Image (cartoon, rainbow, N blue to C red):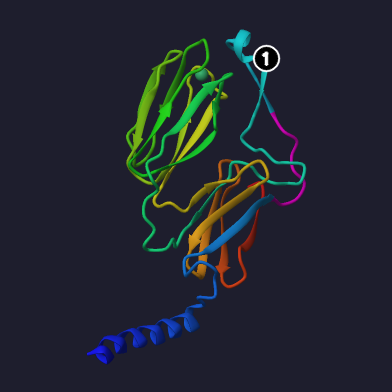
Amino acid sequence: MSLARHAPRGAFRASAALTCLLLGCGLAGGASAGSIRGKVMFAGTAPAAAKVPVTIDQYLCGNEKPADDLQISSAREIRNAVVWIENAPAEAAPAAMQKVEVDQKGCSFVPRVVVVPAGGTVDFLNSDRLLHNIHATPKTNVSFNRTQPMGRTIPITFAQPEIVRINCDLHSWMTAWVVVAAHRFYAVTGPDGGFSFDDLPPGQYRLQVWHERLGTVPASVTVGERQPAQVSVEMKTR
Ligand SMILES: [Cu+2]
């Protein structure tokens, strides 16, 4: 009886050891402890930061605004690129429904680029003492065009994975992007061009890197025993 109970456990241990041999369970913390750390870099000489003239509401918006559609550090690191894993682990659950906010502040959308899980909601805010509007004509999500006085919150739900451009029709330079994510392995690069993914099983991953001005660039990275897996992706002007 006692032997019969122990035998399957022994067999399980042996099979687990074999699985580890094949898949590499040497990773600290188990089979899903893999991480990716990456950078998105600009190839070549970065163009000078552009300005756009302000032709309306200068009393609040100023006379010009940084274009902000291509933000590159002095070390050629690209901000506001969106990176996602194309072959995300099958068990990847949708991201938790956390609040995503986009404010209209100083006549700019802040932040300019956000990620929201499919089915999630973005709260659009207006902190400015003037009228803005939010206007989008997505392909697979519902279009919207809403006037937004100061202090009003407008929640918009995005059902389908898609990259959605948002504009304010009153201020032509105002653009934001809502990246509706199919799973939780999406990231927006910070000012240092950096992004990261955690809780990945070992394996080879195909990445897609999207930037509003620079298009989409594929990359690949292998998560193995050396942690975290490092990857650098270069983008250039189209
Ligand atoms: Cu506006």
Q: Where is residue 142 in the image (x, y as percent from the top left)?
A: 32, 34
Q: In this view, does 162 lie above or below 16?
A: above
Residue 45 magenta: yes
Q: Nearer the viewer, residue 78 or 169?
A: 78
Q: What residue type is labelled 1?
A: Asn
Predominant SS along the magenta part: loop
Q: Where is residue 38 in the image (x, y as percent from the top left)?
A: 62, 56
Give, as a single range, the part of the protein colored magenta.
Answer: 42-50
Q: Where is residue 207 in the image (x, y as percent from the top left)?
A: 53, 59
Q: Which residue is drawn at 53% across and 29% down?
A: 175
Query: What residue is pinned by disc 1?
Result: 63
Q: In which quarter of the image is the N terminus?
A: bottom left
Residue most extreme to the top: 59
Q: Is residue 182 above or below residue 128?
A: below
Q: Which of 226 and 173 is in front in this view?
A: 226
Number of on-image labels:
1
Q: Which residue is drawn at 51% across and 32% down?
A: 176
Q: Residue at x 67, y 14 (%)?
A: 63
Q: For ligand 1, tell me if the residue under mark 1 lies within 8 Å.
A: no
Residue most extreme to the left: 1
Q: Nearer the viewer, residue 12 or 4?
A: 4
Q: In this view, does 209 lie above or below 138?
A: below
Q: Residues within 10 Å of mark 1 (few under 14, many from 20)?
A: few
Q: Which residue is drawn at 36% across and 62% down?
A: 91
Q: Is mark 1 on a helix, strand or loop?
A: loop
Q: Position of residue 150 (x, y in %)?
A: 46, 13
Q: Nearer the viewer, residue 167 or 229?
A: 229
Residue 134 magenta: no
Q: In this view, does 77 lie above or below 55?
A: below
Quarter of the view holding residue 18: bottom left
Q: In this view, does 146 lie to the left or right of 204?
A: left
